[in-house]
Image (spheres, rainbow, N blue to C red):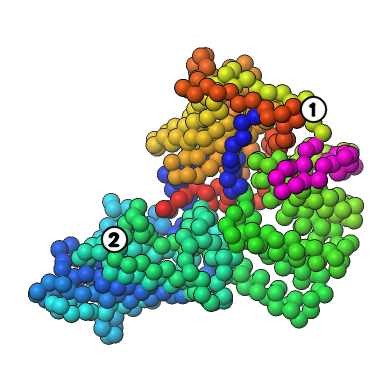
């Protein structure tokens, strides 16, 4: 079977693209921006700027005091006096206009007054919003220091938050920006664990900076900021301060009493909460560190108190969630078996504990072949089969399986289309799926009254009578759909409660062209051996993630700003 590479942070069916789901993206408070000149052409250059985002632990999502210092230099031969602008608010994507607070403007160290005027919104140019406007005189050949400071609330969903700073408004000044220093300051030491760099959390993505103490720093020279330029607008994706302070508190407790099993368990859970991301997990460097730290803390907790059923169940929850997403590329891993063993132990210790039963049900939905239901509870066939091969770094464990059933790629290939579907958010969409004999795939979502979105990728055979697809939209947002079966000329699969409160759609897509779609390259992938590596079974119609986590995972990955 042809192997495909799937990013670990994926989600099931109908992950709508950013352009379509802009109305359900996390509300963003007005981001900070560089100051803008008036409408007239100017000879004033932004020679240098320093922007400090000083994060405070106010509220769940935190807040920040933003201080932007600009050195403005008039390169012309005559003095210029103009009205300089700075946005007070912006559309948050929901038609709301929250305003920045405690705005203070200084010129050459002296606080000056400003007036509220209406100009177009930064992103939605057809809407006018309030701006602060203040008069500044720039003498020829001289530097003028301008400072803008204000409070900004964090944006997003727990346990993560984000702050923004828009550089591109500075492009209105003469020539390039001479230099820029951007400083993110936290109320505790910064690290790759609490600043999520080089990975998108859905509504923000922080590209790598230099960590020093409580700060992360970025420096740019002689640049023209632009939305798609080499230097883009700044986004800062963080662990919410309240969550990170909880970790610091538990670490402090353990430094005083290292034999407190409950403290170890609470710390393990705190690490887990900022490692998992609703649907998927953090694949950045800090995410890998958090996973190992959570494992170590659970192990220490259970070594001190081996009969605590809830901590065994909590440990299994960590391992199962990680291995579930890994199973799309690696099949079952050693973490899968350890998760099953931990939940089995928890059920033996406390078979009627509500929390243990809740986690057991979630794991059952993730691995229905490794953990089966009986009249009195659960069986664990993957733990009792002998022998169970031990995993190696390059090979996932191979379970005894039934004779594989391979699909004929040329018989599967074709274009399939659904009827018009009504989703849980009342949007209507028609789905088209093109499957090619070389196992490439194209997924088109034709939304009513909205632009269509085309995602491309691959499809792969499960060798168990069903297949799955993996595609990415133009914003690089991934979608995995598994459990797809073909009966005659009709594809069948379920939406798996993708939208919050949606009971799930049983989707049918009929072949609209009977001739197989065969691209120029028709090399048909063949099984590598008589015993292929296993792939996960199709999940049950219910998601393995309860509560609002499913919705959060959707929203995180639905909006790419850069």
Q: Residue 353 carries which label?
A: none
The quadrant where residue 5 appears: top right
Residue plotted at (69% across, 51% down): 322
Q: Find the distance from the CA under tag 1 to the CA under tag 2.
A: 61 Å
Q: In this view, does 276 lie to the left or right of 210?
A: right
Q: In this view, does 355 lie to the left or right of 544?
A: right
Q: Magenta segment: does it hold 393?
A: yes
> What crowding class fits label 2: few (fewer than 14 Cα within 10 Å), some (14-19), or many (20 or more)?
some
For residue 494, above or below residue 524: below
Residue under label 2, please give it: 224
Q: Is residue 261 left or right of residue 321?
A: right
Place of residue 490 in the rendered image (x, y in percent of width and height, measured from the top left)? 59, 20
Place of residue 150 in the rendered image (x, y in percent of width and height, measured from the top left)? 38, 74
| Residue 55 visible in this rendered orientation of the protein | no
Residue under label 1, please give it: 402
Q: Is residue 274 left or right of residue 362?
A: left
For residue 19, above or below residue 522: below
Residue plotted at (59% across, 28% down): 507
For the N terminus, give its image quadrant: top right
The quadrant where residue 534 appears: top right
For residue 274, above or below residue 432: below
Q: What element carries label 1?
A: loop
Q: Earlier in the sequence, mark 1 or mark 2?
A: 2
Residue plotted at (50% across, 20% down): 518
Place of residue 488 in the rendered image (x, y in percent of width and height, measured from the top left)? 62, 16
State the residue in front, 384 or 24.
384
Residue plotted at (86% across, 68% down): 304
Instruction: Give the residue at the far left of this rendering.
Output: 78
Instruction: Give the residue at the far top of this rendering.
Output: 514
Q: What element carries label 2?
A: loop
User: Over which residues does the magenta segment extend?
Assistant: 376-399
> What crowding class fits label 1: few (fewer than 14 Cα within 10 Å), some (14-19), or many (20 or more)?
few
């Amino acid at each position: 079977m042809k192997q495909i590479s799937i990013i670990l942070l994926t989600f099931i069916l109908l992950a709508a693209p950013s352009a379509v789901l802009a109305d359900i993206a996390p509300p963003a408070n007005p981001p900070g921006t560089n100051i803008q000149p008036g409408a007239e052409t100017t000879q004033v250059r932004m020679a240098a700027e320093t922007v400090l985002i000083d994060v405070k632990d106010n509220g769940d999502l935190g807040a920040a005091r933003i201080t932007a210092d600009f050195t403005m230099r008039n390169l012309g031969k005559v003095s210029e006096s103009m009205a300089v602008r700075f946005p007070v608010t912006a559309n948050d994507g929901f038609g709301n206009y929250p305003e920045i607070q405690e705005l203070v403007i200084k010129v050459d160290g002296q606080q000056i007054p400003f007036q509220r005027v209406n100009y177009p919104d930064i992103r939605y140019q057809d809407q006018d919003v309030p701006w602060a406007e203040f008069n500044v005189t720039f003498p020829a050949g001289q530097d003028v220091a301008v400072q803008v400071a204000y409070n900004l609330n964090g944006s997003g969903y727990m346990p993560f938050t984000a702050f923004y700073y828009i550089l591109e408004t500075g492009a209105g000044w003469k020539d390039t920006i001479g230099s820029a220093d951007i400083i993110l300051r936290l109320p505790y030491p910064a690290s790759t664990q609490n600043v999520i760099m080089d990975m998108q959390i859905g509504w923000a993505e922080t590209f790598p900076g230099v960590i020093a103490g409580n700060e992360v720093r970025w420096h740019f020279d002689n640049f023209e900021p632009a939305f798609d330029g080499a230097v883009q607008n700044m986004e800062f994706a963080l662990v919410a301060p309240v969550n990170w302070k909880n970790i610091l508190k538990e670490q402090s407790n353990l430094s005083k009493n290292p034999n407190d099993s409950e403290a170890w368990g609470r710390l393990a859970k705190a690490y887990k909460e900022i490692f998992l991301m609703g649907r998927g997990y953090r694949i950045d460097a800090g995410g890998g560190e958090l996973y190992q730290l959570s494992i170590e803390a659970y192990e220490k907790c259970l070594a001190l108190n081996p009969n605590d059923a809830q901590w065994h169940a909590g440990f299994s929850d960590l391992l199962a969630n990680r291995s579930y997403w890994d199973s799309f590329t690696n099949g079952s891993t050693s973490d899968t078996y350890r998760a099953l063993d931990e939940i089995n132990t928890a059920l033996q210790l406390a078979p009627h504990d509500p929390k243990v039963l809740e986690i057991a049900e979630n794991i059952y939905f993730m691995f229905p072949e490794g953990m089966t239901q009986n009249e009195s509870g659960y069986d664990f066939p993957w733990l009792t089969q002998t022998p169970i091969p031990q995993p190696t770094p390059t090979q996932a464990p191979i379970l005894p399986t039934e004779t594989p059933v391979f699909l004929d790629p040329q018989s599967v290939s074709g274009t399939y289309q659904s009827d018009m579907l009504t989703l849980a958010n009342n949007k209507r969409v028609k789905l088209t799926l093109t499957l090619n004999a070389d196992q490439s795939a194209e997924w088109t979502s034709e939304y009513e009254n909205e632009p269509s979105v085309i995602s491309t990728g691959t499809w792969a055979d499960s060798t168990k009578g069903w297949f799955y697809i993996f595609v990415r939209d133009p914003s690089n947002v991934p979608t995995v759909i598994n459990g797809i079966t073909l009966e005659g000329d009709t594809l069948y699969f379920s939406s798996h409660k993708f939208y919050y409160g949606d009971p799930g759609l049983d989707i049918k897509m009929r072949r609209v062209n009977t001739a197989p779609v065969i691209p120029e390259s028709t090399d048909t992938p063949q099984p590598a051996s008589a015993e292929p590596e296993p792939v996960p079974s199709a999940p049950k119609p219910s998601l393995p993630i309860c509560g609002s986590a499913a919705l959060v995972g959707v929203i995180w990955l639905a909006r790419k700003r850069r």
